[in-house]
Image (cartoon, coloured by chain):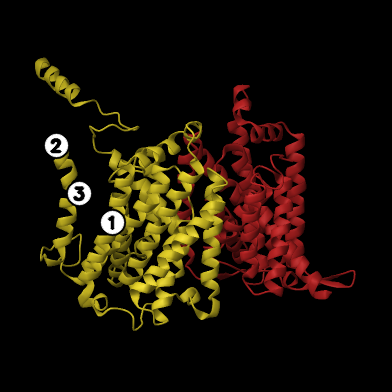
Chain colours: A red, B yellow
Amino acid sequence: MTTIVLLAVTGLGLAALYFLAASGLTLVFGLADVLNLAHGLLVSVGAYTAWVTATSLGGSHPSTRDIAIAVVAGTAAGALAATVVEVTMIRPLYQRTFEQILITVGLSLAGVALLQIVWGTQPLTFPKPAWTATVSTIAGMAVPNHSLILIAAAATVLIGLTLFLRHTRIGLIVRAGVQDREMVIALGVNVRTAFTVVFAIGGAAAALGGALGGIYFGAIDPSQGAALLIFAIGVVIIGGKGSITGTAVAATVVGLLQQFVNYYAAAGAGDLCVIALLAAVVLVRPQGLAGGKTA
Amino acid sequence: MKSLLHRAWPVAVAAVLAILPFSAVDIPVLFDGPFAQPGTLQLLAMCLIFAGVVQSYDLQFGRTGLMSFGHALYFAAGAYPTCVLVRAGWPLWQAAAAALCAGTLLAVVLGAIALHTDGIGFAMVTLAFAQAGTLTITLNPAGLTGGDEGLVLNGPGLPAWLTGVTNTANLYWLALAYVCAAVAVVWLLMASPAGRIITGVRDDTRRVSVLGLNSYVVKLSVFTLSGVLAAAGGIVYVLTTGGVSPHVASTAFTLTLLVMVVIGGPGTRWGPVLGAVVYTYLDQRLTAVSGAVSVSPGTPGWLAGLLSQPLLLLGIVFILLVYFAPGGLSALRPRKSFGRTDTTPPGDFQKARRRVAKLRR
């Protein structure tokens, strides 16, 4: 029983990471049909900014306050990087989806190379306060703190995004744009601003995932973002494009499936299971679990 | 006469390439030694292999409009089984045949599933499938694939004329034969009635369906053929480099192929080949130059670092190309032939303009 709870909580932690990385991806994809391959890079931007901040503030044993500042700095850096990329590189190619994707391809290749030049190819140990590596006892069950942090962060982002999509004007434009972009543009609504905002929010969420992922995995390396991106893409397909709720459900399924199968079958089998699930979803329900509903 | 020239010059290019291993010509800066030297031949062989693989990728991408992010999987499906089976003691030709079958089967099955989606969805699904390949390879089932370390090609079934530094010329010819075959298959296919249908699927899938043709079958056939050509490239690659590493199955590898196609010009006659040769050459040379630079004293550290990761420079050049040369390298030269991106005025117009300029003077 203890094992099951432990697996469930770490699986949910992983799911939270996938949700953070996938939420921006699915909105950008839903709104503009752009598959942002540089999204993994935004994860790394968050992770490395947090690493630099935490190391310079508190060395290898930062306090809780230091790590909180580091995570906030990472998230802000992700939002900033996403905004800069959108405004300077994606926006000039407005409605040229294919070229936009190519730009993100170039960015992802060059960005990882840059990370490798500056910080090397080897993993860096992520500095973290001692309590993040221990367990809390909830209702007699021991659960690891690093997973709890991720779950709390993802839940906050999920609630925040849902409120944003349902109760703000930009959220309304995003929901309408995901359903029928041409119609929204034809009605004279400025989709570009909404797109920039979605891009920035997605970047912030991905970077938050990167920074917290550093705590979760204990180390960061330049290829981590790309590896996470692949599962995030799987989550987007399974969840259905442009759907935050679908993404949350899909991330939970994928995280739990991966964790349980990896433990009970063989290490790595869980990852393959996720891809088999994806193939099944594509065959049976190509529009994904949510099938066109945004929030 | 003109059409004869048009047809003859690809053959002429191939003929020149075929006699290169006998040439003592030495181009100082571009290559380390004369063409006959194994190092130079190896570099050229890599360029040729990638030219063939990129041609296979362009068959999907530039010709049919299918953007796959998992082409590396089919390349690896040629490379890995060949390497594993030769190590297990199989004769090379049997191992290669088995690898080709594996590549074909994989392409048919995965293509049949992935083609239920289109556009970006297709890109995402193929990416996920390729990731399954990478995972399987790094998991190292039964110690077969060598995990992260990769495999070295050796075994009793390997013919002597394909091994050893002295036989690099044979490998070079093999690579040349492969690229000629890949280019010929794609060009002949596209010149045939089937090629028209493929172009139709790219430009207007719905219209092709209205004409009563099954676009799914067309796409799946193209996907399979493209996968087989990539697998063949993987086999030649494993022989040329004498081994294989998980990198050849990675998403980054597919993205590199995409970059090569876009640099050259998707869906054009020479673009993919040109893009692959330019990219592979720069990639290999920059790495070599960085090795030389970093040992020489007095080099600033940032320069050595910059050169050690060629992808940074290549990635930036690629982004600039997407902005400023959307049709790729092959769209840069003025063309008389028809094409969607062609904006060059016809020859007569040029002549008239020159005459007007003369009169003004």
Q: Residue at x 39, y 73 (%)?
A: B95
The answer to whether A31 is drawn above or below residue B237 in the figure is: above
The quarter of the image holding the C terminus of chain A is top right
Q: Position of residue B239 (x, y in %)?
A: 32, 71
Sequence-first tag of 2 and 1: 2
Reading the image, the residue beneath label 3 is B10
The quarter of the image holding the N terminus of chain A is bottom right
Task: Report whether mark 2 lies on the same chain as mark 1.
Answer: yes
Q: For mark 1, give the secondary structure.
A: helix
Q: Position of residue A209 (x, y in %)?
A: 65, 57
Sequence-first tag of 2 and 3: 2
Sequence-first tag of 1 and 3: 3
Chain ID, mark 1: B
Q: Amino acid at mark 2?
A: Lys
Q: Is residue A141 left or right of residue A287?
A: right
- Which residue is the extreme one toward the top? B360
The answer to whether B162 is drawn above or below residue A241 in the figure is: below
Chain ID, mark 2: B
Residue mark closest to the camera, 1 vs 3: 1
Judging depth in this view, the residue of B228 and A21 nearest the camera is B228
- Disc 2, disc 1: CB below 8 Å? no
Q: For mark 2, give the secondary structure.
A: helix
Q: Does residue B29 appear in the picture of this structure?
A: yes
Q: Amino acid at mark 1?
A: Ala
Judging depth in this view, the residue of B201 and A89 nearest the camera is B201
Reading the image, the residue beneath label 2 is B2
Residue B181 badge:
1
Q: Amino acid at mark 3?
A: Pro
Q: Residue at x 74, y 67 (%)?
A: A10
